[in-house]
């Protein structure tokens, strides 16, 4: 299992997270292109912080401030896959909800609605997507004391919005005596969105790559950086965790609405969503809509189910024990109709060996459209290329 381990030992901000993920070998060209499409061409440079080398990202954004609706519309313009856009929207939804709870129902984004925050969120979400890790763990976040001058006046730090974002996420913190803001609302929202492993039991693991993202300040006694590591854990069987299962039955909702609801649920962070045909009372045909999610997503997704489906009740079976296979996404070279292309396949692992493999649909669909051929033919070619690559290395992990 490949995990992204984030260590905000000197706090976290959006630019620090982008820099650390880029330093972990996220494709710089793709990340820069995504950031450029919403703001400007960012500057990326190697710097030192208290003698430690790190990547510093400068968004080169103006000081324009936007409402939540304007921010979301700008995110949707990004040159990035739909999964990245959906993640960026969720990050800003976290910030927007926190701002409303702190300042009231008509809050403006102010500092965190500036263009530099938009660029940082798009860049961080794009880099996270590119790295293709199986999960993210976050070590304790260092927070500071003191006050900060914001748009509304002088506030204690950590800022109220930052504390509200972190509430209920499972992220832990430790307090530093520094009197500057170490963790920003944007940094907190990104960490809250990324985290999947609240109490990671890493066991034995190997470090594949380490990256450092720099903040703006260079204090003399502590490196102002965020550290990111991609680690490979040793998995001998199937992993175990706990999820919530949400269910409701409907008999007056069309297939189009159900399909739309499932799409929205997945974009909002569900691990899985499905609709199962069923016979309901009085012989009426209906569907059982089932959603699998993490505990911290249950309330949000139940509300979404009620709004989209019009159902009056949603059952929640909490803390369901499940077994899950380790999985990775790997690129394989595919030859089809005399052309070559690198396409992704998802591999399932048990005992350190691949036991199942499947082509990712969307990239295969795009190539099929370019070639004007049936997508099933391209999927078959990708699966065959994937199994050939697995057999070439004896079914074991590819050494990078």
Image (cartoon, grey):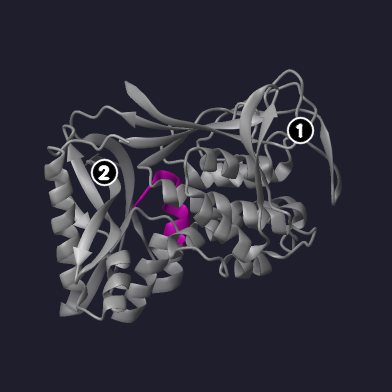
Q: Which residue is mark 1?
A: 217
Above or below residue 351? Residue 312 is: below
- Can residue 226 be seen? yes
In the picture as drawn, the residue positioned furthest to the front comes out as 338
- Marks 2 and 1 sit apart, C-alpha to C-alpha, by 39 Å
Above or below residue 90? Residue 202 is: above
Q: Quadrant of the C terminus?
A: top left
- Can residue 290 be seen? no
Tell me if 67 is positioned left or right of 14 in this view.
right
Quadrant for residue 352, please give it.
top left
- Residue range of the region highlighted in magenta in the rendering: 292-303
Q: Is residue 293 magenta?
A: yes
Could you say whether the residue bearing mark 1 is in a helix, strand or loop?
Answer: loop
Q: Which residue is mark 2?
A: 327
Q: Residue 396's spot in the image, x, y percent?
A: 18, 36
Q: Residue 168's spot in the image, x, y percent?
A: 53, 40
Q: Residue 216's spot in the image, x, y percent?
A: 74, 37
């Amino acid at each position: 299992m490949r995990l992204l381990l984030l260590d905000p030992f000197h706090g976290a901000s959006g630019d620090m997270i982008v820099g650390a993920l880029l330093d972990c070998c996220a494709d710089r060209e793709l990340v820069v292109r995504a950031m450029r499409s919403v703001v400007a061409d960012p500057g990326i440079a190697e710097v030192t912080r208290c003698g430690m080398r790190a990547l510093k990202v400068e968004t080169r954004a103006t000081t324009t401030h936007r409402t939540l609706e304007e921010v979301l519309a700008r995110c949707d313009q990004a040159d990035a896959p739909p999964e990245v856009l959906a993640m960026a929207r969720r990050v800003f939804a976290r910030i927007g909800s926190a701002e409303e709870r702190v300042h009231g129902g008509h809050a403006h984004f102010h500092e965190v609605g500036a263009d530099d925050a938009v660029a940082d969120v798009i860049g961080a979400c794009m880099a996270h997507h590119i790295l293709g890790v199986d999960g993210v763990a976050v070590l304790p976040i260092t927070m500071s004391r003191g006050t900060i001058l914001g748009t509304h006046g002088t506030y204690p730090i950590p800022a109220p919005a930052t504390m509200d974002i972190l509430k209920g996420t499972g992220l832990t913190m430790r307090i530093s005596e520094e009197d500057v803001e170490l963790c920003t609302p944007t940094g907190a929202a990104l960490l809250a969105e990324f985290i999947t492993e609240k109490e990671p039991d890493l066991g034995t693991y190997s470090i594949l790559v380490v990256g450092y993202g720099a903040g703006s300040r260079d204090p003399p006694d502590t490196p102002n950086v965020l550290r990111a590591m991609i680690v490979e854990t040793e998995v001998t069987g199937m992993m175990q965790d706990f999820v919530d299962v949400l269910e409701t039955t409907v008999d007056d909702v069309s297939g189009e609405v159900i399909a739309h609801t499932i799409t929205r649920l997945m974009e909002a962070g569900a691990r899985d969503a499905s609709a199962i045909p069923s016979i309901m009372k009085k012989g009426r045909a209906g569907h059982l809509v089932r959603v699998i999610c993490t505990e911290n997503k249950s309330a949000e997704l139940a509300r979404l189910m009620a709004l989209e489906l019009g159902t009056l009740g949603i059952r929640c079976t909490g803390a369901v024990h499940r077994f899950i296979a380790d999985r990775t996404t790997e690129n394989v070279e595919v030859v089809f109709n005399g052309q070559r292309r690198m396409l992704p396949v998802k591999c399932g692992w048990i005992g350190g060996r691949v036991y199942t493999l499947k082509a990712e649909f969307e990239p295969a669909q795009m190539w099929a459209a370019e070639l004007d051929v049936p997508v099933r033919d391209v999927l078959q070619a990708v699966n065959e290329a994937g199994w050939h690559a697995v057999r070439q290395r004896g079914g074991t992990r590819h050494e990078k």
